[in-house]
Image (cartoon, rainbow, N blue to C red):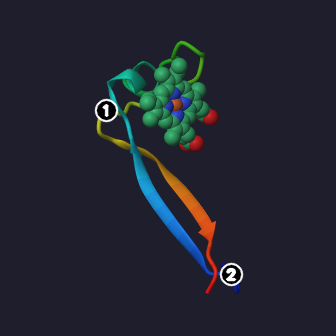
Amino acid sequence: MGKQAVYRHMEPIRLMAPCLPCHGKAKGEPDMLGYSKDGLEAGDLIGLMSVTVAVDD
Ligand code: HEC
């Protein structure tokens, strides 16, 4: 990042069964919080975790 050497680690965030009441089907229907459901299934990719740590050279 610029002149700073970094170690960067990324991991996918996949949905599990407990996520589906809010992120599952049917797409567009309101979840328990009033947001729209996403229509996704268990195992689907929903995000990415990214950790960046500065390292010396
Ligand atoms: C109680 C409801 C609920 C449950 C259960 C739930 N989420 Fe969410 N999640 C939300 C809401 C609400 C948002 C924000 C949606 C928005 O901003 O439009 C969100 C957003 C996210 C985001 C960010 C998406 C983005 O586009 O920024 C990720 C990643 C995520 N959830 C992953 C998960 C995972 C993985 C699980 C299960 C381990 C889970 N969620 C369970 C309600 C829930």
Mark seen at residue 57: none
Q: Where 50 falls versus 16 (above or below)? A: below
Mark seen at residue 41: 1
Residue 38 location, x and y as percent? 45, 32
Q: Earlier in the sequence, mark 2 or mark 1?
A: 2
Q: Amino acid at mark 1?
A: Glu
Q: Where 24 falls versus 56 (above or below)? A: above
Mark seen at residue 4: 2
Q: Residue at x 37, y 24 (%)?
A: 25
Q: Residue at x 29, y 39 (%)?
A: 43
Q: Dot 2: what SS?
A: loop
Residue density around tag 2, few if under 14, some if 14–19, many if 20 or more, within 10 Å: few
Q: Dot 1: what SS?
A: loop
Outermost residue on the right side: it is: 3
Left/right placement of residue 10 relative to residue 18 reads right
Foreground pick, 52 / 12: 52
Residue 47 location, x and y as percent? 47, 47
Q: Amino acid at mark 2?
A: Gln
Residue 10 location, x and y as percent? 46, 60
Residue density around tag 1, few if under 14, some if 14–19, many if 20 or more, within 10 Å: some
Q: Residue at x 60, y 75 (%)?
A: 6
Outermost residue on the top side: it is: 32
Left/right placement of residue 20 relative to residue 2 reads left
Disc 2 Cβ-to-ligand 1 distance below 8 Å: no
Foreground pick, 28 / 55: 55
